[in-house]
């Protein structure tokens, strides 16, 4: 099912820049929701009236509280991993909105296939953080549009992984193609996603290069703080093994 301007689902009539409790505005019509301590552990964003990713199942109550009285038209995933899909079902059912998911990750989101890669680390993450399977109403494909952002297929971390990129100001929501903190120490800095959570490391490196070729001006990560210094991205990509 492809949602268009004729979608039966509710759309926000007015999107403004008014203050939103516990949310931090990071760009025009882009907010980062407060999630948990330490900061930037599992990031969730609101672009216009679309929630991008949904953290863990333990975050559902906090996210719903922050979204109270805020228009919401859908939840869109960058990929299906336990720390991104955890609160999907509760948010979608509570707010009566559909779920959009990259096509390559739909089977995992709906419970018809296991999350990948099939490592012990993923299985432990599922036990601790994953939410229940939930039906996908919109399959996301390369070139689709969500709230003024272009969907770009960036596989490797998972088969369907996507980023969201807005041409007008070159803001990119990059999911887990890259992270801006160390997965163990939490130290800020650019890192590839850990191999134990990544299906194809080489494919993901190609996706990192695809991201860099877009010449973004601001990067919003699934893990780690927002990055404004694109010279750091250029240096990181230059060091990637060929």
Image: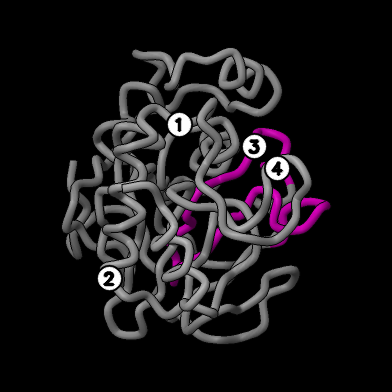
Q: Is residue 123 left or right of residue 108?
A: right
Q: Which residues fall within the magenta stretch? A: 34-61
Q: Which mark is residue 214?
A: 2
Name the residue rendered at 53%, 79% in the picture: 229
Other-residue count near label 2 (Cα within 10 Å), few / some / many at <14 / 14–19 / ≥20: few
Asked if residue 51 is among those painted magenta in the image, a careful observer would answer yes
Q: Is residue 174 above or below residue 119?
A: below
Which residue reaches farthest right?
37
Can you identify the residue that label 3 sits on? 56
For mark 3, does the 10 Å Cα neighbourhood hold few (<14), some (14 to 19), or many (20 or more) residues?
Answer: many
Residue 15 or residue 217, whichever sits in front: 217
Disc 3 on helix, strand or loop? loop
| Residue pictured at 45% horizontal, 66% vertical | 49
Cα–Cα gap, marks 2 and 1: 22 Å
Q: Which label's residue is closer to the chain start, 4 or 1?
A: 4
C-alpha separation, residue under disc 3 versus residue under disc 1 = 18 Å
Mark 3 and mark 1 lie on one chain; the one further toward the N terminus is 3
Mark identifier at residue 59: 4
What residue would you read off at disc 1?
198
Looking at marks 2 and 1 on the same chain, the residue that comes earlier in the sequence is marked by: 1
Examine the structure image and report whether residue 239 is included in the region drawn in magenta: no
Q: Nearer the viewer, mark 2 or mark 4?
A: 2
Q: CA distance from mark 4 to mark 1?
A: 23 Å
Residue 58 at x, y = what percent? 73, 36
* Image quadrant in which the N terminus is located: top left
Which of the 4 image quarters holds residue 11? bottom left
Distance of label 4 from label 3 (alpha carbons): 5 Å
Between discs 2 and 4, the one toward the N terminus:
4
């Amino acid at each position: 099912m492809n949602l268009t301007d004729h979608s039966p689902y509710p759309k926000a009539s007015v999107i403004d820049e008014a203050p939103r409790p516990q949310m931090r505005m990071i760009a025009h019509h882009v907010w980062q929701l407060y999630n948990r301590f330490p900061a930037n552990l599992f990031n969730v964003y609101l672009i216009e009236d679309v929630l991008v990713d949904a953290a863990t199942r333990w975050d559902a109550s906090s996210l719903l509280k922050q979204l109270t009285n805020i228009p919401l038209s859908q939840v869109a995933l960058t990929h299906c991993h336990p720390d991104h899909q955890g609160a999907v079902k509760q948010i979608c059912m509570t707010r009566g909105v559909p779920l959009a998911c990259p096509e390559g990750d739909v089977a995992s989101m709906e419970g018809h296939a296991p999350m990948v890669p099939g490592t012990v680390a993923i299985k432990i993450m599922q036990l601790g953080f994953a939410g229940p399977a939930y039906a996908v109403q919109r399959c996301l494909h390369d070139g689709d549009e969500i709230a003024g952002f272009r969907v770009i297929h960036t596989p490797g971390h998972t088969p369907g992984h996507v980023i969201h990129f807005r041409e007008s100001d070159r803001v990119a929501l990059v999911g887990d193609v890259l992270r801006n903190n160390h997965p163990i120490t939490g130290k800020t800095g650019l890192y590839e996603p850990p191999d134990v959570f990544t299906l194809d490391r080489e494919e993901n490196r190609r996706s990192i290069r695809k991201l860099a070729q877009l010449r973004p001006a601001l990067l919003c990560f699934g893990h780690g703080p927002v990055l404004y210094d694109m010279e750091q991205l250029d240096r990181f990509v230059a060091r990637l093994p060929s």
